[in-house]
Image (tube, rainbow, N blue to C red):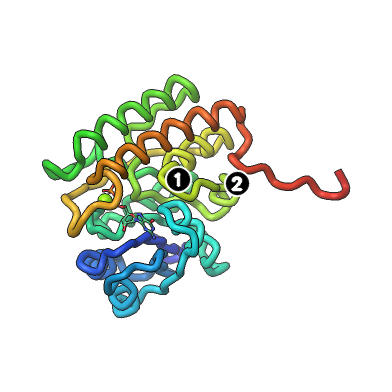
Amino acid sequence: MVKSRHIGVIIPALNEEASLGHVLADLPSGLAEVIVADNGSSDGTVGVACQGGARVVEATRLGYGSACLAGIAALSEKVDIVVFLDADYSDHPNELLRVVKPIVEGRADLVIGSRVLGDAQPGSLLPQQRFGNWLATRLIRLLFGHRYSDLGPFRAVSRSALQRLAMHDPTYGWTVEMQIRALQEGLAVTEVPVSYRRRIGRSKIAGTVKGTLGAGFKILATVFLLRLRGGAPLVQEPLSDQS
Ligand SMILES: Nc1nc2c(ncn2[C@@H]2O[C@H](COP(=O)(O)OP(=O)(O)O)[C@@H](O)[C@H]2O)c(=O)[nH]1
Ligand SMILES: [Mg+2]
């Protein structure tokens, strides 16, 4: 199914030595490239990544979105579908082909793996995550007229669509920014159900008070900011001399 496509995988990871090896081992074969986007992990994450056959990219600025941006900047030219998933083994890497399928079949530019539509192990989605997802997707529906069910991290986007998104957010606004920008660009978006399980290791975001408040605020601020910008990306391209 995917022989003719070059799939690149980007895995943001911060101190995930216990889980990352499982993620890499469960990825399907035949991928063009697997990148682990690190932020100076103090544990054995980098060693596990190399041992698992991934290429490690160091993001200088701390943050989930910043790691994803560093991964994108390092993608080789041949990659034409980009997949993001987390390093904590909450996502099921063996479901990757399900997530890219709508793009391979030409039905979508962006595919969100929805944990709400799929099989989420009890306790894997914390109450604050469920509420945050509900609130953010509700706001997107009200402000942008599209019904998403989740802001899940497991997602696929075509390379050309990714360029049009002009992604910018260096932290927790990353996922919602991508989903709203896709609507603003008129891209074909769809969701597929994905499974989700309790993470290995300690959460950096939803499992901490600071992470939850920070992510909640950032997500809502990003939704409103993008609405106010009326279709423009968060950062405008500099005007060329000719204009
Ligand atoms: N490189 C990098 N990865 C991060 C950062 N924050 C979180 N991550 C990774 O992003 C993914 C999601 O974080 P996680 O702690 O599981 O958040 P949760 O799912 O909301 O509990 C995991 O793979 C983390 O290792 C960061 O600042 N830099
Ligand atoms: Mg997680």
> Looking at the picture, which amino acid does disc 1 mark?
Trp
Residue 146's quadrant in the figure? top left
Task: Provide the residue designation for mark 1.
Answer: 174
Q: Earlier in the sequence, mark 1 or mark 2?
A: 2
Residue ID at (37%, 40%): 214
For label 1, the crowd category at 10 Å Cα-Cα, with few meaning under 14, some 14 to 19 and many 20 or more, is many
- Extreme-left residue of the structure: 122
Q: Ligand 1 within 8 A of label 2's CB? A: no
For residue 103, side relative to residue 195 (left or right): right
Task: Provide the residue designation for mark 2.
Answer: 164
- Extreme-right residue of the structure: 242
> Looking at the picture, which amino acid does disc 2 mark?
Arg
Residue ID at (43%, 37%): 218
Task: Tell which of 202 and 10 is nearer to you.
Answer: 202
Task: Tell which of 148 and 192 is nearer to you.
Answer: 148
Q: Is residue 102 above or below residue 202?
A: above
Q: CA distance from mark 1 to mark 2?
A: 15 Å
Residue 15's quadrant in the figure? bottom left
Q: Secondary structure at mark 1?
A: helix
Q: Secondary structure at mark 2?
A: helix
Q: Position of residue 149 (x, y in %)?
A: 32, 32
Q: Is residue 92 above or below residue 4?
A: above
Residue ID at (61%, 32%): 231
Q: Position of residue 34 (x, y in %)?
A: 40, 68
For label 2, the crowd category at 10 Å Cα-Cα, with few meaning under 14, some 14 to 19 and many 20 or more, is few
- Extreme-front residue of the structure: 210
Residue ID at (48%, 22%): 143
Q: Please tell me in which quarter of the rendered image ligand 1 is found.
A: bottom left
Viewer-side label of 1, 2: 1
Count up the numbered dots.
2
